[in-house]
Amino acid sequence: MSKDDKKTQGDPNMEKPGFSGGARSPSLYAWVSLGAFACCLVVLLLLIGNESNLASFGLVERIYYVVLVLMGLVAAVFLFGVIPSSATYEGRLLGGRLRLGGAIVGAALVVVGGYFFAPQAWTFPLTVYVHGPGGPRDIPLRNAGSVVLELGPESKRAQIGESGQAYFPAIPENLRGQPVPAWVESETYQSVGPSKSRLDSSVLYLQIEVKLRHYQLAGTISDETGRPLPDVRVSLPAYQVSRQTNADGRFDLDVPAPDSRGVDLVAEKPGYEVARFSPTLGDTALSFALRLHH
């Protein structure tokens, strides 16, 4: 054994293979890994606290991957600095053999395994545009009413804005392309078309129409002497509604209309002059008289 070999063997401060730059300090690496782990926790808390806002911009998956990378670095620093491990490459370029130690393997398992094996619970934003029979530019509801989506066991509701839109920042990704019940809730309008809509994209259109109410219009028709007239045909041409009076000259019409309004009523019976009146929907105490033809 040469003098140089003896000197190297007897000197405890000489560098060991695989650890360049002098002796390692395990406590230093431990503090570094602890600080990186604290950064991971901060990012994770921000992710949880701002999930809705991040989901609206489609950033949840990207932030989650950043956390994975940080956790992988934590694992690598801890394993390399505290637990002896290494990674070496032998051979000529791509034709050689790669031997991986604990630090690199641990980081790879955290980053790759965490990304591919984590439950996929991502969300996507959805904007629902509410329009009338005239198409997307026909916007009867502005800052009024709401859109309701039935997403499995729960329902989500969003108010309709100035442009007739309702915004849902976080729809579960597993519902993409699936039909879900969707409708509009309003005092004056109701949804038109199928009860379920397919979420094929981040935009959905719902058509609405004026909500019709049912109004009664009733009364009695008599002749000029005050005797009740049966079999008088009473009709509302604009609503295609008609009935005949009974033996007591009584008629009762059920009229679907958006509100109580004045209507044109026509009463006709063979041998009598056709009579036209202008009652108001909801009036149930009408009284008319028909005159004989002269």
Image: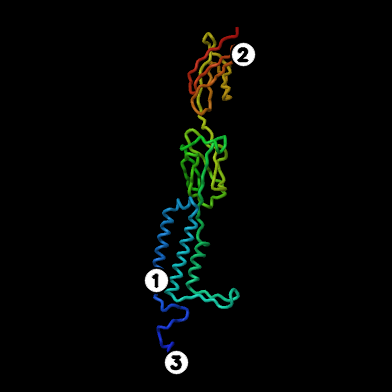
Amino acid marked by disc 2: Pro
Amino acid marked by disc 3: Lys
Q: Residue at x 41, y 88 (%)?
A: 10
Q: What residue does disc 2 label?
A: 270
Q: Residue at x 49, y 17 (%)?
A: 286
Q: Residue at x 52, y 14 (%)?
A: 288
Q: Quadrant of the C terminus?
A: top right
Q: From the viewer's perspective, is the residue at label 1 or at label 3 nearer? A: 3
Q: Earlier in the sequence, mark 1 or mark 3?
A: 3
Q: Alpha carbon of mark 2 to alpha carbon of mark 3: how far?
A: 138 Å
Q: Nearer the viewer, residue 248 or 52?
A: 52
Disc 3 is placed on an element classified as: helix
Disc 1 is placed on an element classified as: helix
Q: Earlier in the sequence, mark 2 or mark 3?
A: 3
Residue 194: image x %, image y %?
Answer: 57, 40
Above or below: residue 83 compared with residue 140: below
- Please give the label number shown on residue 114: none
As drawn, the residue found furthest toward the top would be 294
Q: What residue does disc 1 label?
A: 30
Residue 237: image x %, image y %?
Answer: 58, 22
As drawn, the residue found furthest toward the right would be 270
Above or below: residue 7 compared with residue 191: below
Q: Alpha carbon of mark 1 to alpha carbon of mark 3: how far?
A: 38 Å
Q: From the viewer's perspective, is the residue at label 2 or at label 3 nearer? A: 3
Q: What residue does disc 3 label?
A: 3
Q: Nearer the viewer, residue 213 or 100?
A: 100
Mark 1 and mark 2 in contact (Cβ < 8 Å)? no
Residue 99: image x %, image y %?
Answer: 53, 75
Amino acid marked by disc 1: Ala
Q: Alpha carbon of mark 2 to alpha carbon of mark 1: how far?
A: 105 Å
Q: From the viewer's perspective, is the residue at label 2 or at label 1 nearer? A: 1
Disc 2 is placed on an element classified as: loop
